[in-house]
Image (spheres, helix red, strand yellow):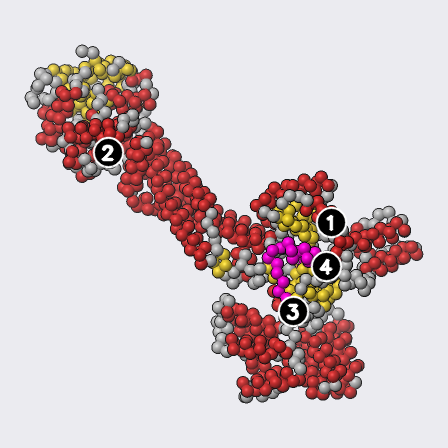
Amino acid sequence: MSAIVSVENVVKEYPLGKLKVRALHGVTVSFGEGEFAAIAAPSGAGKTTLLNLIGCVDVPTSGVVRIEGQATSDLDDAGLTRLRLHKLGFIFQSFNLIAVLDVYQNVEFPLLLQGGMTKKERDHRVREIVEQVGLEKQMRHRPNELSGGQRQRVAIARALVTRPRIVLADEPTANLDSATGQNIIALMKEINRKNRTTFIFSTHDPMVMNQAERVIRMADGRIVGEERRAAEGAA
Amino acid sequence: MERLKILFLMAFRSLGGHKIKGLIVGSLLAFGTFLFVLGTTMLENIERAMEASITRSITGHIQLVSAHAVDRLTFFGPEASAEQDIGVLPDFSRVRDVASKVPGVAAVVPMGRYYGQPILNTELDEAIEALEEAFAQKDPAAIEDRISKVRRMTARLKEDYLRAASLAANPEEHEKARAALDRATSDEFWTSLRENPEEGLQFLAFEIAKLSDDESMLYLPFIGTDLHRYAESFVHFEMVAGELPPPGTRGILISQASYDQFFKNRPARVLDLIHEAKTLDHRTIADDAALQDQVKRLQEMTAQVTMHLSPRAAAELDAKLRERFPEVEGDLDARLAAFFRVDDENFAERYEFFQKEIVPHIPLYRVPIGGTFTLRSMTKSGYPKAVNVRLWGTFRFKSLERSELASAYSLIDLASFRDLLGLMTAEKKRELDAIREEVEVAELEADDVEAALFADAPVIEEGGEEGLDLDARLAALDRPTEEDSETFDPAEIEKGTILHAAVVLEDPSRLREVMASLQEAFDREGLEVKPVPWTEVTGIVGQLVVVMRAVLYVLIGIVFVVALVIINNSMVMATMDRIGEIGTMRAIGARRGFVLALFLLETLVLGLLASALGAAGATALLALLGQTGIHTHQPFLIFLFGGTALHPTIDVANVVWSFAMIVLISVVSTLYPARLAARVAPVVAMQGKE
């Protein structure tokens, strides 16, 4: 199986005053199409940095990140933006919905950015995905009228509506109670199975980790271990 | 398209989320737009009205002046003095011929703006004349009545004179005057007058009358012009009384306002002023010190009514006043003084009584229409010069009757005008050329010639008989013969010197174009003439509009700068607040341009909404004002408004301009915060909270 995401010997440094803080010390890892992978690590181990690099919102100090073979460090801001828009979907820890738009509009938003779709096609796509996450009744609600779990469902719908190859989720359940978190992970997994969308998410919740086919463990900016489990896991 | 829709939606919704900020910025922008639309529209309307006021009454659209003018020709304000050196146009007929061929020129009117002093009989003059007439009629009752009046006036004159005596410059002259006044107030003088009226009247007329100083001796600004052409070319001009002098006849037309102000019987005039103040300006005698003062003055003016009354009219009036004031002791003057003690209650009735019962029996104006008076002026080279002018009539400028500015100028024929200024007529120029040739004077400076043209000019120092001969003959040139004191050749008169000329256009909007063509034509013909637009000759009036415009723009500028700073500030804060949201949009795949557009649009939407509101408010107010009109009785405003009411009309261009300004301000004020927002890195979406 060819890698859809490959991270090769990546180093990431951040300036902190006059000092440089090294968040990643030469990480190499790759993900295949349709994987449902968790990056497990305590806070500050570098998992968010790694996700940022894969998510093309940041570029490595050295080493190469490839998305479908394309090295991100070769792209300018516009190129990275295009890559994010068309190939990637994001689910954030704090949902990051656009407060002034309702559920429908939030989900529609990436499609509008992409353009090239008729209103009807768009409407069809939005309704389909909103139904899939079970929010058809809340279609016209604004984010502040929804519960945390509902908001994360909207975020998932928004991440998936463009049918991205890869969905990145940074601690998607951290702000949810455990039952809701379980539901969200189950939903992600269902979509992963159905659409063969690659999911890479970070977590430090063992319950969530248990759902992953593959768990990559990190500590101090390095990969320290990896486990693979049966696809049907603990579902 | 759809993307634009979501941008608008987000912009609207973001505004809804920040109501207070939106309200503050919005009301500022709305106020700015309101001010802009209202202000510029009003200014334009005033400018248009003023343009019509001025160009249709006095200046025309373009003034032609000598290219050698040192000072700027100015019609209004303190700069408009007789000392202005604006040069001369040596031959009007040539200027007229060249200018009137230029396309777009409707009329060319010769002009000369100048000042003269009307020499009018004083009250005392008139009283002495009345006494003379009473003696001539041999009417003993009238003689006694007039004597008592002249005596009273002489006594008052003596008082005034002694009071002012300390200021007298020449003690010898002063002694002589004092002696004369002593004599005129003595009983012996009046006894002898009854016996030998001729000697006594002469003494009064020559020694006493000259001591009386009339306050109303004021300067009369006038414009020397071709009266017929003026009347035809200036559409605001209309005759009030009398008629235009026949072509080729000397004469003066006085504006009705000046006629009332300087020539009207003074008690009648004061009553008019009180009447106007009460009816037009709604002032009351009880609350207005100036009006109270006028009522007081009025009571001292009884002689100016009674001395004009025939004995019969006096007796009739006395009987009527006796009925009204049975308690008042003394003569008719005392009863009239009681009558003149007006207040808010009785004024209207007494004013009517005065018009009905008194006005028909007195000469209402010091010079009647058709009468002649002497106008004295200084020539351009500084010699006093006087001409007798016949008052043919009075005129006004339509809808500007109450404007002092518009009615300041009187109009005088060109021949009299040239005499007053010592300018050369074509005929005199020819005669002078002949003399010049004869005595072989190679170069006579224009000033010298002009000076020499006066009988009362000092003799030019020149040795030899020939020189004296020249002086005498030059002087003789100015002594008008019987014919040319009344008439002149209208064609001939155009060939002489004038000071400037007015050009009236067919279409005022082509002003610049016609000015250029005029300049070109003058240059081609070798005439040293410069066209000046009306805006540059209006002096203080034109400047006023410039100042009003400047004040308005500064005010609008301040409002917009404040709006700019506030918008900029609040948008920077909004950017900080929304960093998470911006980062999220960027992470999801929004380009920098999208974020930039979103922020710009937010202010733009606010700006357009606010300015639509402001413009709508201003337009509504203007429409209302256009219906009702802005009314004024203030003379200067009447001039600005071109009448007693201004009905502003709305120019769509101003509304469009205000929108353009708001767009500009919105963009400029948001440029920095929007760029700041566009630079927010998508990675921030991953950090912290929304």
Quadrant into which the N terminus of chain B falls = top left
| Image position, residue B118 (x, y; %) | 70, 66
Q: Earlier in the sequence, mark 1 or mark 4?
A: 1
User: What residue would you read off at disc 1?
Assistant: B93
**For the residue marked with disc 2, what is the amino acid?**
Gln
Disc 3 target residue: B263
**Disc 2: which residue:** A105
Magenta residues (range):
B222-241
Q: Residues within 10 Å of mark 2 (few under 14, many from 20)?
A: many
- Residue at mark 4: B247
User: From mark 3 to mark 1, how far is it between C-alphas?
Assistant: 35 Å
For this orientation, the residue located farthest to the top is A1
- Where disc 2 sits, the SS reads helix
| Subunit under mark 4 | B
B367 sits to left or right of A141? right
Label 4, label 2: how far apart the Cα atoms are: 87 Å
Q: Nearer the viewer, mark 1 or mark 2?
A: 1
Q: Nearer the viewer, mark 4 or mark 3?
A: 4
Q: Position of residue B396 (x, y in %)?
A: 61, 62
